[in-house]
Image (cartoon, rainbow, N blue to C red):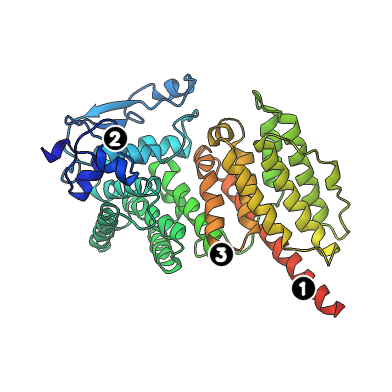
């Protein structure tokens, strides 16, 4: 049997494949996803910035269709049999294939501008394959990176090392962009040292370029750096970059204001927008009262408990906020109940359809998930909440960089209020002894 006809799993493990369709015997026995790649491969790339009128096409489509066009080989590096699959994994990993993607968003730029540069730059191409392979590892439930993932990671590091001494390539957009997935991956793995090294290197390159406003790719590189910084901030409370300082500068209620404005124009479909808007309004008022010097007069009993999991997620999120705000005024309130609320929030989020959030309530999705991330001390759970809503961040326009700042300020406010309430509660317990 020719190995070129084997499925990806058997080929990767260098095992004999019986070529049974849709699942070969070995994959069926190992409960492994079985994927076959056609013999005649077609290298693809999104038309993006190449074809005239593509922006009009995107604006006038009802679904986020992916426009693919065959390209003549070669790739910028020696071709391997799995590369077409990893390129598709890169697109699938963005998580926006079933929702409208508008020109100017991060998702659109990753599908077009990033891919266009990757097909001409070996370092960025390896970074693309690294992301695609990492996504494949995640789908298989692998805790350790596969040999393909590690290979392309090492190639990115090797090429970056070779370019560092070059006056142009050492600080060009493709080189800086290629490091961002390595830094984000380190954050997701909880590898603080690796994340810090990658971040320090990236921001040194940005400094040599003259600042983040000098970066190219239509603002994509700067947005990726900001998103990576948000990951490390959530994972490690790490701040070694100029975009996010030690204290949030935006009002902590700016995200709620954005959501309230966006819900006015939302079609709603089968989602009761006004009910969700009422919850966000309560959160806005709660933040304003909490920032004052008086005890907040908040009544959680006036919030109806919805049956749908989407509404239940919003209800749990506002319950967490109100519990955190009222905790210092109830010194014997069991703070451990916050942990139960966070786990309930995770459970209900897992019952919801991500595409529904992304299509109708992307900002609310980020708002809910960041409340969960800010309320837990567990690294793995914080990363889970961030990763859950990452696709929503990619739908935001690159020209609207304030959204990530607002999201960070929201996360910081909830986290600091929680830590402050817990400290205040401990002091009251000690004094009562």
| Residue 124 appears left or right of 218 | left
Q: Is residue 131 above or below residue 260?
A: below
Element under label 2? loop
**Comparing labels 3 and 1, the label whose residue is closer to the camera:** 1
Residue on which the image places disc 2: 23
Q: Nearer the viewer, residue 63 or 341?
A: 341
Q: Nearer the viewer, mark 2 or mark 1?
A: 2
Name the residue located 47 percent from the left edge and 54 percent from the top edge. Answer: 228
Q: Residues within 10 Å of mark 2 (few under 14, many from 20)?
A: some
Q: Is residue 154 above or below residue 44?
A: below
The Cα–Cα distance between marks 2 and 1, rounded to whole angstroms, is 57 Å
Residue 124 position in % (x across, y down): 30, 48
Q: Which residue is mark 1?
A: 426
Q: Residue at x 35, y 44 (%)?
A: 31
Question: Quarter of the image containing the N terminus?
Answer: top left
Q: Position of residue 170 (x, y in %)?
A: 29, 58
Name of the residue lying farthest toward the bottom: 433
Q: Earlier in the sequence, mark 3 or mark 1?
A: 3
Badge number at residue 237: 3
| Horizontal and vertical percent position of residue 262 | 66, 33
């Amino acid at each position: 049997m020719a190995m070129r006809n084997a499925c990806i799993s058997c080929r990767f493990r260098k095992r004999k494949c019986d070529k049974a369709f849709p699942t070969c015997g070995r994959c069926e026995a190992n409960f492994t996803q079985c994927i076959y790649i056609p013999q005649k491969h077609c290298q693809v790339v999104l038309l993006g910035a190449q074809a005239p009128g593509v922006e009009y096409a995107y604006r006038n489509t009802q679904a986020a269709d992916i426009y693919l066009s065959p390209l003549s080989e070669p790739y910028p590096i020696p071709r391997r049999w799995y590369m077409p699959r990893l390129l598709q994994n890169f697109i699938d990993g963005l998580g926006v294939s079933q929702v409208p993607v508008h020109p100017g968003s991060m998702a659109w730029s990753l599908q077009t501008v990033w891919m266009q540069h990757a097909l001409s730059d070996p370092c960025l191409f390896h970074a693309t394959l690294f992301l695609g392979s990492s996504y494949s590892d995640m789908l298989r439930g692998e805790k350790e990176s596969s040999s393909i993932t590690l290979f392309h990671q090492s190639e990115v590091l090797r090429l970056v090392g070779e370019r560092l001494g070059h006056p142009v390539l050492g600080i060009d957009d493709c080189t800086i962009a290629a490091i961002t997935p390595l830094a984000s991956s380190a954050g997701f793995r909880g590898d603080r040292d690796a994340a810090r090294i990658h971040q320090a290197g990236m921001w040194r390159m940005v400094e040599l370029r003259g600042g983040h406003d000098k970066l190219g790719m239509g603002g994509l590189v700067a947005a990726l750096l900001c998103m990576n910084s948000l990951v490390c901030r959530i994972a490690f409370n790490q701040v070694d970059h100029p975009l996010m300082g030690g204290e949030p500068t935006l009002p902590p209620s700016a995200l709620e204001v954005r959501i309230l404005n966006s819900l006015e124009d939302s079609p709603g479909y089968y989602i009761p927008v006004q009910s969700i808007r009422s919850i966000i309004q309560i959160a806005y008022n709660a933040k304003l009262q909490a920032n004052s010097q008086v005890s907040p007069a908040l009544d959680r009993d006036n919030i109806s408990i919805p049956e749908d999991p989407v509404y239940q997620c919003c209800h749990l999120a506002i319950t967490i906020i109100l519990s955190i705000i009222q905790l210092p005024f109830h010194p014997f309130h069991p703070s451990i109940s916050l942990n139960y609320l966070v786990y309930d929030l995770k459970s209900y989020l897992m019952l919801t359809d991500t595409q529904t959030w992304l299509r109708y309530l992307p900002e609310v999705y980020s708002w809910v998930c960041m409340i969960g991330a800010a309320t837990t001390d567990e690294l793995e759970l914080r990363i889970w909440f961030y990763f859950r809503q990452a696709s929503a961040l990619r739908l935001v326009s690159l020209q609207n960089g304030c959204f990530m700042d607002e999201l960070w300020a929201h996360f910081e406010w909830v986290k600091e209020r929680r830590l402050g309430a817990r400290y205040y509660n401990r002091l009251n317990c000690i004094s009562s002894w």
